[in-house]
Amino acid sequence: MKKLVVVVEPTKTGYSAYLPEIDGVASVGSTLDEISDNIKEAVMLYQEELNIEENFKLEYRFSIEAFFKLFKSINISALADKSNINASLLRQYAKGIKHPSVKQAKKIEQSIHKLGEELTSIRF
C-alpha cells in the first residue's frame, strides 16, 4: 500500500487539499470530514482515469493555521504551556500572522500528539 501525503491549507471559504506527488489531484471542503471525502473521491477518479488499481493510504499534513482553524476547541494557552512556547506567539502561528520554524512546528506537533495520548488513556 502506497502512502500519499495530503496537504491541507486554509482558504477564505474553508480549506483546500492537494497531493504534492500527483498534479491535478486537489479538492476543497469546509470540515475535515468533507475534505477527506472529497480528496478520496479525487484520488479514486485519478485511479479510474489512469486505470490504477493500487491501494493508497492518505496521510494528512496541516499548516499550523489550518490545524487550529479546524480544531477550534483546542485551548491555545494550555497547548502553549505544554509546548513551552509563548502563548501570544502560538496565537500568531494559529492565525497565520507568523509562521513557525521547522523546530517550533515539530515542538507543537509533539505536544499535540502527547495530548492525544494522554486523552486516549483516560477512562471513566
Image (cartoon, rainbow, N blue to C red):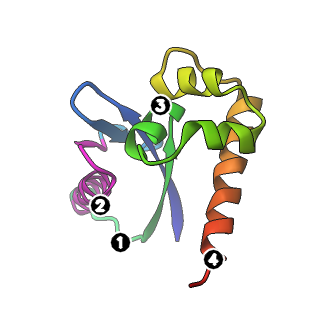
Residue at image mark 2? 47
Q: Is residue 105 left or right of residue 33?
A: right
Residue at image mark 3? 65
Distance from Cα at disc 4 to Cα at disc 2: 41 Å
Residue type (three-letter) at the residue carrying disc 1? Glu
Picture coordinates of residue 44 (x, y %)?
A: 26, 62
Kindly identify the residue that appears in the image at 70 percent across and 23 percent down. Answer: 101
Query: In the image shown, does 48 or 41 lie closer to the viewer?
Result: 41
Magenta residue span:
25-48
Helix, strand or loop under label 2: helix
Distance from Cα at disc 2 to Cα at disc 1: 7 Å
User: In the rendered structure, are the residues bearing label 2 and label 1 in contact, judged by CB atoms less than 8 Å apart?
Assistant: yes
Residue at image mark 1? 53
Distance from Cα at disc 4 to Cα at disc 3: 28 Å
Q: Mark 2, residues whose alpha carbon is within 10 Å: few (<14), some, or many (≥20)?
A: some
Helix, strand or loop under label 1: loop
Helix, strand or loop under label 4: loop
